[in-house]
Image: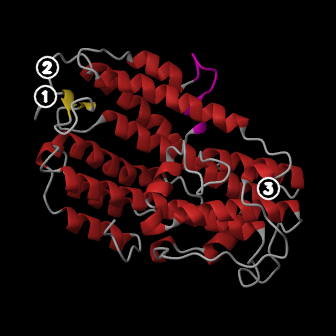
Amino acid sequence: MKKIIIAGVIFFAAFFCWSCTKQITSYVPQPTPFAYPTSYSSFPNVNYTNQQAILATVDQLMAAIDQGNTQNTVVDSVALRNIFNGSTTGVNLSSLCVDSAAIVIPGYFISIGQDSHSSVPGSNGIAGVGASTQNSSITYLQSSNGFVYRELVKTSIMEGLLAYRLENILHDSIYNTLLTGNLQANWDSAFGYFDVPVNFPVDTVGSKYWGRYAKNLSASLGLDTVIMNNFLIGRAAIDNGFLLAPSAIPANADYYAINDAATIINAFDELVVGAAIHELSEAQLDSSSDPVLARAHLSSSWGFIRSLNYNASPVRSNNAAQINSILAAYGTDLYNFPKNVDSIKTVIGNAYGFINTNF
């Protein structure tokens, strides 16, 4: 929900400072006066089937886009739009997105439809399909300036829909209802958008989207444990009546659901930027040996930074000029991407409080 009531603003303004967030290097859960399980399926009345249907529709959309990764396979932009708006699936992804993302994403569909008509391989200045030099079975439809469309759509949906819904459900539910049943349902919905197994991160099989990035960045950021533990502790806190912190916020908020929601939101905000930095590192590794794959990683990194403009978080204050300045460092043509990747990573890290960007 987009409405943020005044009480929520006051609390989170005191509790967070996006610009001074520091990279999490270790995590120890606070002691709790109640037991909590190691598997999300152990809670009573768990239900996130709606989120599973939403994620299945996202998968369907990405599969339709990926058809364009095969040379001479035309993708119908209208068909993509119909999946996105629910005309053919019954799940309206567009209506679930933050407004700015819902506007941007259909523009990518138009470009995909146009450039998928290309009958020649993609090259500098020419849209088309490019193949990995290391594995010819890996191919991507890319624009004439080297941006890989599926990565732009993926990152827009990850931030503009999945993170947006997850973070706002956690934030708004704490302030808009104190009914245990409603809080349980909202907490389950938020967990569903994380898209991980019930005993993540012990089991990571099938983790996609944010779950996959949390898993892949486990060693460097540790956010997989942070997010999962706070989902478990927060749900147990709700079940046991520990809903809101006492008046001394945040000093005595260690084991209340409101604190767990705050921790998850902060972790997701960090994960977005961490994913952008990580994709830059991957692009740097592939830049000389596999330029097509490098451009896919660059597209993903650019997309994550671009998606910060969606401001999916209910507590993050974005600096549009800062975001646009970082995007400018990528340039407008990925065929001529600057070689100073480390300096761009440093700029991103400095802007968003990352002490280390070597991951």
The answer to which of 79 and 358 lies nearer the viewer is: 358
Query: As shown in the figure, which amino acid type bears the numbered disc 1?
Result: Ile
Residue 171 x, y percent position in the rendering: 69, 59
Residue 43 seen in the current view: yes
Dot 2 corresponds to which residue? 120
- Image quarter in which the C terminus is found: bottom left
Residue 333 seen in the current view: no
Query: As shown in the figure, which amino acid type bears the numbered disc 2?
Result: Val
Q: Which residues are magenta?
A: 86-96
Residue 90 in magenta stretch? yes
SS at mark 1 in the image: loop
The image quadrant that residue 138 belongs to is top left
Dot 3 corresponds to which residue? 176
Mark 2 vs mark 3: in front: 2
How dense is the environment of label 3, judged by Cα within 10 Å: few (below 14), some, or many (20 and up)? some
Residue at image coords 29%, 47%: 297
Residue 188 x, y percent position in the rendering: 74, 48
Residue 229 vertical placement versus 20 (above, below): above
Dot 1 corresponds to which residue? 126
Magenta segment main secondary structure: loop
